[in-house]
Image (cartoon, rainbow, N blue to C red):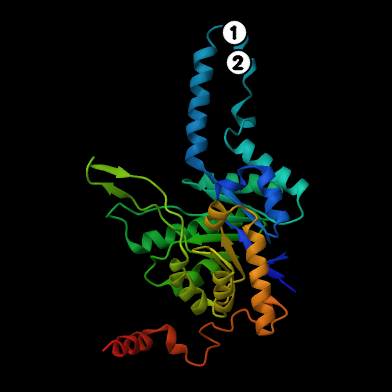
Amino acid sequence: MDFRTNYMGIPLRSPIVVSACTLSEKIDHILQMEDAGAGAVVLFSLFEEQIQRENALFEKARAATSYVFAEAEDYFPDLDDYHVGSTLYLELIRQAKERTQIPIIASLNAVSTEGWTEYAKQMEEAGADGLEINVFWIPADTRISSADVEQRYIDIITNVKKQVSIPVAIKLNPYFSAMGNMAGRLQNAGADGLVLFNRFYQPDFDVDRLQVLSDLQYSDANEIRLPLLWIAVLYGKVPVSLAATTGVQSAREVIKYLLAGADVTMTASALYKNGIYHLNTMHRELEEWMVRLGFDSIEAFRGVMSQQHVSDPSAYERANYIRILEGQK
């Protein structure tokens, strides 16, 4: 069975990709992901704030010890040569490239222009096959306009693409007022792929202790409908790769996303729940479905349920919503 696909110009043996998560912090886990058939691995995100915090601790330690002996400074490398926090991440990229045959995609979440560009360059130099820009930013300042929010995304992708030659995807949230237009603008700014959608941190309340809770819920298969809608709408209209990264629990969600037009589907929650080798189960179920329907390759059915290919394109728009309501009477 031909599972091959192409993501941002990178040939992949499978459309099932491991999304950015802590499982990829260990090289042994990445090797298991390859063994289980993953088409690629998106490494866990490197956050600029973590690096800044570790830099501050480094400076504190140096200040506390350097007064003891004049030579104490010699125990610490120059900051220009000491990328605290990023060092281990870059080494993980190098090891993964040395020990695996599948594409390794770095993931970056920065807060400053310098952070986006400098760490992106370092990741490329370490051997990353691609880069996923993870803009995890909630515009809570009520003075920020929607135009300002959109421009921030455009500026980030523009600046990063000026610094690297590897393909770059941007992980989007679903809250843009004109998603189709925004997708086109990002493509014009240089984005090679769109990852739909980022799951923003959403707090909960403990009503007895009056505390804000910060627990993280795994995604569920029921959450695929919004990214499914936008992948089906964008397919064939914006010339970028499309990645689905919400609710992929089984081959069923993989199939739906591919039918909508996704180049790849990304999963993490299912691997936390069922183990890394759940990827084998997903591939087996995907193959069984393809055999049953007579498809011999991913390309044979990718996008056949997209808006541009279905017999009734209005099924994705307002007219279908009205029909649904009328059917409930």
Please provide percent x and percent y for residue 93.
Answer: 68, 45
Please provide percent x and percent y for residue 134.
Answer: 51, 54
Provide the residue designation for mark 1.
70
Please provide percent x and percent y for residue 202.
Answer: 36, 53
Q: On residue 78, which mark appears?
A: none
Q: In this image, 297 relative to 78: left or right?
A: right
Q: Residues within 10 Å of mark 2 (few under 14, many from 20)?
A: some
- Quadrant in the rendering for residue 143: bottom left
- Quadrant in the rendering for residue 178: bottom left
Q: Residue furthest bottom?
A: 311
Q: Amino acid at mark 2?
A: Glu
> Considering the numbered disc 1 on the image, is that residue within a helix, a strand or a loop?
helix
Determine the CA span between mark 2 and mark 1: 7 Å
Residue 152 visible? The answer is yes
Q: Would you place residue 194 above or below residue 92 in this image?
A: below
Which residue lies at the image location 69% right of the left edge and 44% below the top edge? 28
Given residues 265 and 274, the one toward you in this image is 274
Marks 2 & 1, CB-CB < 8 Å contact? yes
> Considering the numbered disc 2 on the image, is that residue within a helix, a strand or a loop?
helix
Q: Amino acid at mark 1?
A: Ala
**Figure quadrant of the C terminus:** bottom left
Q: In this image, 97 relative to 238: left or right?
A: right
Provide the residue designation for mark 2.
73
Please provide percent x and percent y for residue 9.
Answer: 69, 67
Q: Would you place residue 281 above or below residue 119 in this image?
A: below
Which residue lies at the image location 51% right of the left edge and 23% below the top edge? 59
Which residue lies at the image location 63% right of the left edge and 61% below the top edge? 17
